[in-house]
Image (spheres, rainbow, N blue to C red):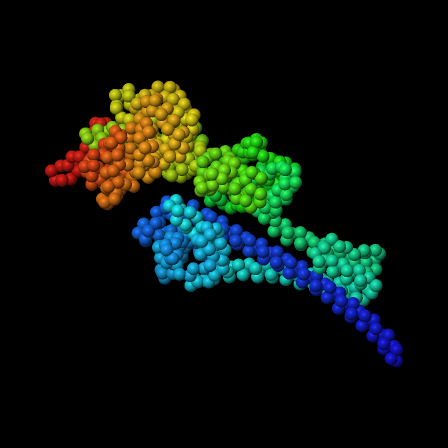
Amino acid sequence: MLKRLYARLIPHTARIKILIVFIAINLAATVAYTLYAWNLKADAVRETIDARLVAAASAAPKMIGYDYLREARDPKSIDEQRYLAMVRLLHDYCQKVGLRYLYVFTQEGNKIIYLADAASEEEIRAGNYGRYYGEYDARPLGLAQAFATGKAQFAEYEDRYGHFRSVFQPMQREDGKTLVFGADIDLSDVETQQREALNQALLIGMGLFLAGVLGSFWLARTLSAPLSRLAEAADRIADGDYRVRVPARGHDEFALLARAFNSMGSAISEREAEIIRMAYIDPLTELPNRVRLAELIAEEIQAAQQGDDSVAVVMIDIDRFKYINDYLGYSAGDAALKSIAQRLRQVQRDTDHLGRFSGDEFVLVLPGVHKGNIDNVVRRLHRILENPLAIAGQSIDVAGSTGVAFFPLHGTSANVLLREAEAAMYLAKRTHADYLVYDPGQEANRKSQLSLLGELKTAVESNQLSTYLQPKINLADGRICGVEALVRWDHPERGWIPPGQFIPFAEQTGKIRALTLWILRECMLTSCHWAALGRNVRISVNVSVNDTEDPAFAGMVQSLLEETGADAHNLCLEITESATMEAPDKVLDALRHLRSLGFKLSIDDFGTGYSSLAYLSRLPVQELKIDRSFVLRLDEADGLQIARAIVELGHVLKLDVVAEGVETQAAWDTLVELGCDQVQGFLVAKPMPIVAFDEWYKHHKGYWRDAMEKDESGQMA
C-alpha cells in the first residue's frame, strides 16, 4: 500500500520540481530581458528629452532675435508691451515643441535677471512669470554653473513654477555679457514616458513569462534528462545570448518543447534587435540616427588612427525646409526627407556612412577623404540636390548648406567633429556659400524657409511682376526730383503677394539676382522713355547685398545699359548700410565699378548699421537715406538728435540727404528746419504703378507743393 502510494507520488514530485526549476529559469530570463529593455528605452527617453532641450535652447537666440538680445541691456530698453509679446511668442513655441518654459537670464552682480520668459495668458494675468529685468530667486545649481563655466548644464530642480528637467545654455553677447538660455520640461512628462516604457517592457515580459509557464507544464510531464540542456540554454538567454538553440530531433514531447523554446529565443532576439534598431536608426529615413552616427565616426577614427588616414564629416542642412512643413504639411515634409535621403545615398560609397543628424540635417562620414579632394564630393552632392522634388503635387526646389570637418585636422572625437561640421554649415548658410570647411577663426561668426523661389522664376519670365514708383520731393523748391522703384507681384492664383513674403527669402538663398536684373531693366526702359519726354526724374533701385558682393554683377548691369540704351546718370542704386559691411572690400570694388558707369549711389536705411566714418568716407556714394525708424521718431528728443546728426554728417561729406517714411506735416517741417535735401513717404504719395505716376506727375506739373502751401484758413491746399 505504501509502496504503491510512494510510486504514485514520486512522478508527481519530480514533475513539480521540474516545473518549479523551469519556471524559475524562465522568470529569470524574462526579468533580465524586461529590465534590460526598460533601461534601454528609459535611456533613450532621457537622451531624446535632453536633445529636445538642447535644440530648443540653441534655437532660442534666433527665435527671440539678436536685435532684441542686443537691446536688452538695462531695465528701460524693452517696454512692457514688447516684453509681453516676447513672453507669448516663447510660450507658443514651447507649446509646439512640448516644453514647459523657455527663458533668458543674465547676471547683474550677484543677481540673476530675466531678459525673456515664457508664460500662458492665465499666468500673465496672474502675474506668474518673470518680469523683464526682474530677479530670479530660485538659483538652481546648474544655472550658476552655466554662468561660471560658460558651458551648457543640465539640472533637475523645483521652484515655485514646478519641478523640471532643464538645460542652461550660455552665450556671449557682443558686449561680452553672458546670457543663459534655459529650457524646461516638466519632470512629470519625463516620468510619464519612462512609466510607459516600463509598462511596455513589463507587458512583453509578462507575455514571454506566460508563454514560458505554459511550455513548462508541457515539458514537465515528460522531461527529465534533457532538463540540464534547457536550463543551460535558459541561462545563456538570461545572459543576453539570444542565438542559443536547443536540439529538436524527432516528434516527441521534448522535440516539440525544444522547438517552442527555440521559437521563444528567436522572438526575444527579434524584439531585442527591434529595440536596438529603434535606439540607433531613424524610423523615417531608415538611416543611422545621431547616436549611431557618433559611434560610426568613432569607429572610423579608430581605423584611421591605425593607418594614419583622414576622415571627413560632412553635414548638410536642407535650406528652407521649415516652409515645406509650414505650407504643405508634415506629411509632405516627411516625404521630402525620404526623397532627399534616397538622393544622398547616390553619393555614398560602400565604405561611407550616411545618417540623419536631426530634423532636416544629414551627415556623410567619408573615410579617406581629406581637404584636398572634398570639393568634388560636395559638388556632386549639390548637383544631386539641384533637381526639384515632386511633393504633394508641387515642384519644390531644394538646396543644401554644407559644412565639413576633418579628422585629425579639426578634432579627434566624434562629437567635436560633428559640432565643427555643424558650425561650418551654419556659416555657409549665412554667407550663401556652396560649402565651407570648418575654420576655428570663424567659429565666433556662427549664427535656418520654403519660399516662392520656384514660382518667382516663373513670375519674372511671365510678366507677373510690376514696378511701383514712390515720388521723392526736393525740399528746397518742391520739385519732383526722383522716384524709388518697388517691385510688386500679382500671382495668378494667390493674388497680390507682399514683398516681405518673397524678397527676404530670395536674398537669403542668393537667388535675388533675377529679380534685381528684372527691375533694373524695367527702370532703364522707363528712364529712356522719360528722357525722350524731357522729364528730369531720377529712378532709384534697391540692390541686394548678394548682388554687390558678386564681382560679375557690375558687368551684368553694364550689359543692361548697353541693351536698353539708358543713361546711368538718370538712375540711382540704393544699397543698405548693413550690406556695405558684409564684405567691405568686395562691396567697395563693386560700387566703384557702378559709379564709373555713371550711376548715382545711395546708402539706404542709414543709421541702422555699424559703418564707421572712415569707411563711409571711402564709399563712392552721393546720397544718404535716413532710415524711416528715425523719421517716425522726430517728435522724440533722441530721434530728432539722430536725424540732425545724419543730416549734418551727410552735408560734411557733401552728400545729399533723403528722409524716407515722411507721413506727417510736422515731420516735413522738422526736416526742412534740419536742412534735409529730399523726402519721400505717404504724405507725398503712396507707391503707384508707372502709368498712375505719369498721370500724378502731369497733374502736379513736376512740382509738389501740397505740404508747402496752405490756404488762408490754415488747411492744406
Q: Residue at point 64% right, 57% down?
A: 37
* Quarter of the picture holding the N terminus: bottom right
Q: Is residue 213 above or below residue 375?
A: below
Q: Dividing the picture into quarters, in which one does residue 687 lie?
A: top left
Q: Residue at point 15% right, 36% down?
A: 710
Question: Is residue 33 visible to us here?
Answer: yes
Q: Residue at point 61% right, 58% down?
A: 39
Q: Residue at point 37% right, 24% down?
A: 593
Q: Is residue 137 left or right of residue 328?
A: left
**Which residue reaches farthest left?**
712
Q: Nearer the viewer, residue 47 or 416?
A: 416
* Quarter of the picture holding the C terminus: top left
Q: Nearer the viewer, residue 503 or 551?
A: 551
Q: How many numbered discs?
A: 0
Q: Nearer the viewer, residue 668 or 150?
A: 150
Q: Is residue 248 left or right of residue 632?
A: right
